[in-house]
Image (tube, rainbow, N blue to C red):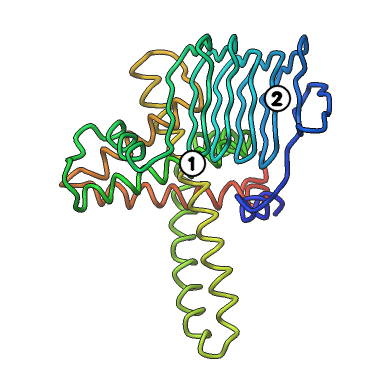
Amino acid sequence: MRNTVSILLLGCLALVRPVLGAETEKAADYTVVVAPGETCSKSVTSLGGSVRVAGEVKESVLMVGGRLDVQGKVGKDIITIGTQVTLADGAVIEHDLIVIGGGLSKGDRVRIGGEVMFVSRKEDLRDLASTLLPFLPESGGKSLLKGIKITLWLIVSLLVLTLFPRVVPEATELFRRHPLRIAGIGLASLFLFLVLTIVSVVLSFFLIGVPMLLLTLSGYLVVLVLGRTVLYCFVGQQALSRLLRHRVSLLASLLGGIACYALIKFLPLGGPFLLLGLDLFTLGTGVGYLLRRRLFPSL
């Protein structure tokens, strides 16, 4: 129940999650500070706060909104959405830098070991869609709309991964261990959502159905967002692990899963049926994880 409420408030909370496993020093202008000489062994996540990394963060920095100043070293990725990011001279990012919205300012002597993705304009959004879909035509039409939807799902999935870094791996493992049961839960959930939606629409003539419809749609959205993020990670992890013959990071799995989803979405034959099947796994994964204590008591 707590996870359900948390995800329902996704993007609306003005909270900052403290750094886990590291002592941080508080400063007037920053919510979280990793001071010079300090080492943070876990990921730093923040929603709407200000973070300064002058020491070393062993894992990733994941932020939504706020401000990020990096003068030290980040051992893995920096992923931000709507954040003002400043990288001082001498800053080191071992893996990828992904900045969606907000701003990016970096010195000439910043070292980034992976890819740099900065999305701030409509042109950048189109470039991002073209990167995911190299066959996306320059003309508009349905292909462009599909590309925009896929890009939006990428942003939403990154948001979920940023705010709930532990939930996604746990739900992915649940899906991996019980795929057939997850599919059954998905089919039952789809039927239940359809029935609740129809009943809510009928009752809306008597006012009582309006809040019921809002709750039904909100619950469906929560399940859909969580389930798709998990499914992207699982599919991407399976595909990239077989292709590269070694385990890949959760971020790489997510990007690989989005790319696979894009390929399926653009298949002229069989694509819609595959997507329908994936949606059953999506709903089953979301509902299964949120109700895992009841549905999977042995875990």
Q: Are marks 1 and 2 in contact (CB under 8 Å)?
A: no
Residue pictured at 50% horizontal, 23% vertical = 97
Q: Give the CA separation, mark 1 to mark 2.
A: 25 Å
Q: Is residue 159 above or below residue 283?
A: above
Q: Is residue 77 above or below residue 133?
A: above
Say whether residue 110 is left or right of residue 37.
Answer: left
Q: Circle 2 is placed at which residue position?
A: 52
Q: Secondary structure at mark 1?
A: helix
Q: Is residue 188 above or below residue 178?
A: below
Viewer-closest of 88 and 194: 88
Asked where in the image residue 114 lies, by quadrant, the reply is: top left
x and y percent of residue 233 in the render?
46, 33
Q: Is residue 130 above or below residue 58?
A: below
| Mark 1: few/some/many CA within 10 Å (<14, 14-19, 20+) | many
Q: Circle 1 is placed at which residue position?
A: 157
- Work out which residue is located at the far bottom of the displayed protein and give it: 206
